Image: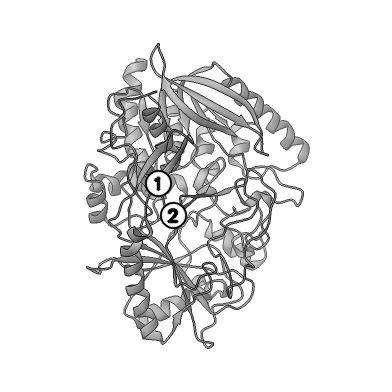
C-alpha cells in the first residue's frame, strides 16, 4: 500500500484495497522479520510515537513502527470501518466479550453495553482494581477514539508540571507546530448558536452562567466544516450519527491522516500492525533487541520475533511504555534502570458527572458526539476544575447534562511488576481520588444550586452515585521527564533508549493531554535529532 493511500482514509474498491493491504503486509513482514536489524524502532503509533517517526524519517533514518492493534482502513460487511456507539459490535472493543462503555446504565438498567465476539477492536479498557484506563488500539492509538479536544494547558500550570520545559518556547514554537500538523480547527460560532446538534452545550452554558462560571469554546481535530455538511445532508454522517469512542468513519483527523501519513510519504517508515513489543534487552553490538509477538485479529499468536535496533523510542503510552521498562528492570534485562520508572502516575484528575435538568430545559434528541464547549473554573484557589460538556447521543430526549471534569489532584500512583504473573499492576486506591471528587462536587453543586437541579445517580453502574471516578481517558506518568529520563526523554545510562509519550507527564495537565504530548514530542525529538542522530550519521 502506497503512502498516499494510507493518508487518504477509507479505501475504495474491494480488490484495490485487498491488493494494497497485501503489498503493505508483505513490506511490514520483511522489515519486521525475525532477526531483523533496523536503525530505529518506535514502539506504538500514538501521538508521541507518530511525531518521532516522522521527524526521524525526515532526518534520513529508516524507522520501523510496532503497533499492537490493527490498521483501521478496511470497511466491514456493513460498509463501515467503525461501528457506532449505539450499535457496538466486535470492532468496538479489544478482546472483550461485552463492551464496557463509560456510562454503565440508564435508569439503573443495563441497557448500554452489548455482548460481542472477542476481537482486536479499537477501544481497550485496562482494569487495575480501583482504577481503569481507556486506551485506543490500532494504527493511530488514542487519536482513533478520543473526543479530539485540542486544548493547551495554562502556561503557569505547564511550567509547574514540567519545570524543565521552557513554557514560553512551547507556546511560541511547538504548540503551533503540533496544531498545524494535527489540523486543529474551531467551530463556527454562528452555526453553533443555531444548530439543534449543540443544544445540549448551550443549555449547559446557560446553567453554568447562572452559577457565575465561564464557558470557553474548544478547538478539535474533527473537521467542523465536514460536520456542517453532515447537518446539511451533503456529507455522510459520523459525529452526527452517534460515532466517537469506537471511531469515526468520517470527519476525524486521526494520526493515520496527519503525522503517520506524512511519515509514510517519506518512504523511510514501515508500520507493522498486530505486533506487540513484549520485552527488551541490550544488544551485544550496541543498541537493543525487542522480543515481539505477532498475532492475528482473533488474538491467535502467529509468531514470536526478535528485532534489533540502534535506537529505540518507546511511545506505547503511559501503560505500555512503563510496563516494558519495568519488566526490563525487574527481570534483570536492564537491571540498572532507575527507581523512578513506574512512579508519578495519575489519571489527570478525571471525574465524570451528570445532572438532571428541568423539563423546560431539553438537551435535544439530536446531539453531536464531538464536544465543542468547556466550563473553565481553573482559577478557583481551592477546587480548580475544567469541565468539558459531553453529549448523551441516545437519539431521544434525556434532559441530561453530562461532563468530564478535569481537576487538579496531587495524588500519584505507582506501577509495579509482578514476576509471578508477568504483569504490571497499579498501586492506586479510591481514597486517592477524593481530591478530584471533592473538586467536582464543589463545582457542580454550584451549578445545581443556581438552577435548582440535582445529579443523575443512575448512569455509572448499579450503585447510585453522582460521580464516576474509577476510570480515566487521560493516563499520564510512569516515566516522568527529568526524573526517570533527562530533560528530553533520554533514559540515563542507556544510550539510544528514549521515551516519547504521555508517560513523561507527571499525572496531571489540567486539560486533555494529547496536544501537549504532541508538542512535547516535537520539542524532544528536535533536540535528539540534532544532538544524537545527525552527528552519528555524519549528516
User: Foreground: 319 or 86?
Assistant: 319
* Viewport quadrant of the C terminus: top left
Q: Earlier in the sequence, mark 1 or mark 2?
A: 2
**Is residue 525 rendered to the left or right of residue 362?**
left
In the image, which disc is placed on residue 131? 2
Query: Is the residue 11 above or below the residue 302 in the image?
Result: below
Q: Position of residue 51 (x, y in %)?
A: 43, 37
In the image, which disc is placed on residue 426? 1
**Is residue 481 rendered to the left or right of residue 354?**
left
Q: Position of residue 16 (x, y in %)?
A: 74, 35
Near mark 1 (Cα within 10 A), the count class, few <14, some 14-19 or many ≥20, is many
In the image, which disc is placed on residue 524? none
Check whether the beta carbons of the residues at disc 1 and disc 2 lie within 8 A of each other: yes
Q: Position of residue 118 (x, y in %)?
A: 67, 46
User: Foreground: 186 or 360?
Assistant: 360
Would residue 68 be visible to someone looking at this image? yes
How far apart marks 1 and 2 lie (CA) works out to 8 Å
Q: Position of residue 59 (x, y in %)?
A: 41, 25
Colour setting: one colour
Q: Quadrant of residue 352?
A: bottom left
Query: Is the residue 226 above or below the residue 57 in the image?
Result: below
Q: Secondary structure at mark 1?
A: strand
**Is residue 79 rendered to the left or right of residue 366?**
right
Amino acid at each position: 500500500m502506497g503512502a498516499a493511500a494510507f493518508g487518504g482514509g477509507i479505501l475504495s474498491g474491494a480488490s484495490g484495497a485487498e491488493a494494497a493491504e497485501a503489498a503493505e503486509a508483505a513490506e511490514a513482514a520483511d522489515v519486521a522479520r525475525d532477526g531483523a536489524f533496523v536503525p530505529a524502532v518506535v514502539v506504538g503509533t500514538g501521538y508521541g510515537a507518530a511525531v518521532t517517526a516522522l521527524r526521524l524519517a525526515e532526518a534520513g533514518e529508516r524507522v520501523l513502527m510496532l503497533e499492537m492493534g490493527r490498521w483501521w482502513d478496511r470497511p466491514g460487511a456493513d460498509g463501515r470501518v467503525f461501528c457506532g456507539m449505539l450499535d457496538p459490535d466486535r470492532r468496538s472493543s479489544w478482546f472483550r466479550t461485552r463492551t464496557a462503555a463509560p456510562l454503565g446504565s440508564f435508569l439503573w438498567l443495563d441497557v448500554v453495553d452489548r455482548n460481542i465476539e472477542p476481537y482486536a477492536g479499537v477501544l481497550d479498557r485496562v482494569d487495575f482494581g480501583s482504577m481503569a484506563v481507556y486506551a485506543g488500539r490500532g494504527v493511530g492509538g488514542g487519536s482513533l477514539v478520543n473526543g479530539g479536544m485540542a486544548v493547551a494547558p495554562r502556561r503557569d500550570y505547564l511550567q509547574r508540571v514540567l519545570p524543565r520545559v521552557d513554557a514560553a518556547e512551547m507556546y511560541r514554537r511547538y504548540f503551533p507546530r503540533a496544531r498545524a500538523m494535527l489540523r486543529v480547527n474551531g467551530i463556527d460560532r454562528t452555526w453553533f448558536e443555531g444548530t439543534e446538534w449543540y443544544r445540549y452545550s448551550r443549555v449547559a452554558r446557560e446553567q453554568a452562567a447562572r452559577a457565575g462560571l465561564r464557558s470557553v469554546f474548544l478547538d478539535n481535530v474533527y473537521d467542523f466544516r465536514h460536520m456542517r455538511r453532515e447537518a446539511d445532508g451533503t456529507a455522510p454522517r459520523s459525529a452526527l450519527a452517534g460515532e466517537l469512542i469506537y471511531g469515526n468513519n468520517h470527519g476525524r483527523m486521526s494520526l493515520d491522516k496527519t503525522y503517520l501519513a506524512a511519515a509514510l510519504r517519506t518512504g523511510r517508515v514501515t508500520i507493522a500492525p498486530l505486533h506487540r513489543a513484549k520485552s527488551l534487552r541490550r544488544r551485544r553490538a550496541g543498541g537493543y533487541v525487542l522480543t515481539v509477538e505477532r498475532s492475528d485479529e482473533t488474538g491467535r499468536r502467529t509468531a514470536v520475533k526478535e528485532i534489533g535496533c540502534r535506537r529505540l523510542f518507546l511511545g506505547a503510552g503511559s501503560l505500555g511504555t512503563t510496563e516494558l521498562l519495568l519488566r526490563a528492570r525487574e527481570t534483570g534485562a536492564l537491571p540498572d534502570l532507575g527507581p523512578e520508572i513506574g512512579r508519578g502516575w495519575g489519571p489527570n484528575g478525571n471525574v465524570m458527572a451528570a445532572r438532571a435538568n428541568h423539563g423546560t430545559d431539553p438537551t435535544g434528541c439530536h446531539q453531536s458526539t464531538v464536544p465543542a464547549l468547556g466550563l473553565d473554573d481553573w482559577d478557583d484557589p481551592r477546587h480548580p476544575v475544567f469541565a468539558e460538556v459531553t453529549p448523551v447521543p441516545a437519539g431521544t430526549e434525556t434532559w441530561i447534562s453530562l461532563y468530564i471534569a478535569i481537576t487538579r489532584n496531587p495524588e500519584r500512583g505507582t506501577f509495579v511488576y509482578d514476576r509471578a504473573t508477568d504483569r504490571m499492576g497499579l498501586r492506586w486506591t479510591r481514597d486517592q481520588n477524593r481530591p478530584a471528587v471533592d473538586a467536582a462536587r464543589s463545582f457542580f453543586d454550584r451549578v445545581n444550586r443556581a438552577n435548582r437541579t440535582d445529579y443523575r445517580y443512575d448512569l455509572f453502574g448499579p450503585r447510585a452515585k453522582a460521580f464516576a471516578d474509577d476510570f480515566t481517558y487521560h493516563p499520564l506518568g510512569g516515566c516522568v521527564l527529568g526524573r526517570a529520563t533527562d530533560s528530553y526523554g533520554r533514559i540515563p545510562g542507556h544510550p539510544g533508549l528514549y521515551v516519547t509519550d504521555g508517560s513523561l507527564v507527571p499525572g496531571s495537565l489540567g486539560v486533555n493531554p494529547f496536544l501537549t504530548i504532541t508538542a512535547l514530542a516535537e520539542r524532544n525529538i528536535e533536540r535528539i535529532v540534532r544532538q544524537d542522530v545527525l552527528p552519528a550519521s555524519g549528516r
